Image (cartoon, helix red, strand yellow):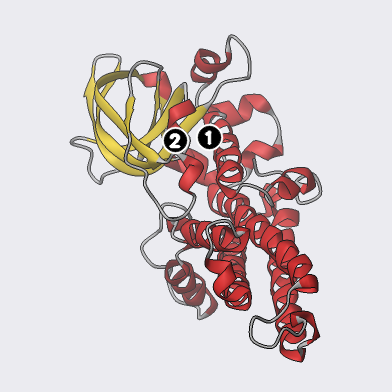
Amino acid sequence: MFLGHRRAAVPRRGYRGCTSSAWLASFLGAHSWLLSHFPEQAQADVWSDGPDVSIGGIFAPMGKAKAVDGGYVLDGRWPWSSGIIHDEWTILGAFIEGQTPPKLHMFLIAPGDFTWEDTWHNVGLSASGSHDTVVENAFVPTHRVMPFEWARDGVGPGVESLGSSLYQVPLAPGFSYNAAYVALGAARGAYEYLREWTKSRASSVTGAGVAEHPSTQAELTETAVELDSAQLLLERTGRRILNPAALDLKTRVECRRDNVYSVKVILSALDRMQRMAGARGMYVSNPIQRAWRDAHAIATHVVFNFQTVGEFYGRLELGLEPPTRDPYF
């Protein structure tokens, strides 16, 4: 999670295959990174028997917490819990009752204190198992609770003890960078399939080779340029987050702007590839349509809302006060 662009080459190549698997690998890494911001005792609770622990998580405040002696009691339901079938622990967002103004906190939930319900029947990322997490009357000790801003700003007692800049990356540029690469991997895989398929494909109307059409050559070229453009934007973010100390608010917003826009460009490339594939591209057996569906599903994640990012960046560019702060900034 949040690896620099050079060290991320291996996982990015893996993203060309099953996008759902890549999404899970990305998110499981993100949740382990998130745990690094909790106090050391919370990290020891999870990793005392070894590092191979699957950790789920949903940042959105879908639950409510009530303060009690020694901690909190948490209740709620969190949809879109990718990989929850496999998770041993999970980290969930909630507001604390009676706190004014309300402040998002993250709660580390132990095995046995949460369940899941089969609700994920989706056209994109179908194999990600992003079902609902359900928590009922679960006690969470104080050391397993942290303000969300610790992750947002790359701070916290756990980060201080780990002593690596990897854990100091603010959430907004790091998380959206990580997730955007999954979409890019899906598109790269679709492009490689389309390119090789097109070399031997014949028109169903004329029987002529599709690769000989100038329009095919031009559309393939534009698709390749879009994917390269998206990758260059993401690589710039990758270089920037290697130095989290230099990530002031404006730079964070620029990084997230680049990450979000890269996904817009990726969708444009995939939309063109889907059209180029024609009726054959609609078969379930065709990997292009699966990449198209998966990337569009990724783009619905809240971190890829271009209007939110555009408003924030635009106001800063125009010398205006930032809007009400998006929690991911």
Q: Residue at 44% across / 60% down in the picture?
A: 300
Task: Name the outermost residue toward the top.
Answer: 49
x then y, percent, for residue 171: 54, 47
Residue at 75% in and 46% down: 8
Residue 239, image quadrant = bottom right
Horizontal and vertical percent position of residue 212: 80, 85
From the viewer's perspective, is residue 101 above or below residue 48? below
Is the residue marked by circle 1 packed among few (<14), some (14-19), or many (20+) residues within 10 Å? Answer: many
Residue at the image position 76 percent from the left and 85 percent from the top: 208
Q: Quadrant of residue 149?
A: top left
Amino acid type, mark 1: His
User: In x, y percent, where is residue 61?
Assistant: 31, 43
Q: Is 206 placed left or right of 153 in the picture?
A: right
Q: Is residue 75 visible?
A: yes
Left or right of 77 on screen, residue 200:
right
Position of the N terminus, as image quadrant, is top right
Q: CA distance from mark 1 to mark 2?
A: 6 Å
- Tell me if residue 73 comes above or below residue 252 in the rendering: above
- Taking depth in this image into account, of 298 and 72 the one nearest to the observer is 298
Residue that badge 2 annotates:
57
Left or right, residue 162 beside residue 131: right
Q: Nearer the viewer, residue 91 or 103?
A: 91
Asked whether, in this view, residue 322 is left or right of residue 70, the answer is right
Q: What is the crowding at mark 2: few (fewer than 14 residues within 10 Å), some, or many (at least 20)?
A: many
Image vertical order of residue 318 relative to residue 169, above or below: below
Tell me if I can see residue 242 in this picture. Answer: no
Where residue 31 is drawn, which disc sits there? 1
- Number of numbered discs overlaid on the protein picture: 2
Which secondary structure, mark 2?
Answer: strand
- Residue extending farthest left: 98
Residue flagged by tag 2: what amino acid is it?
A: Gly
Residue visible at 47% across and 21% down in the picture: 88
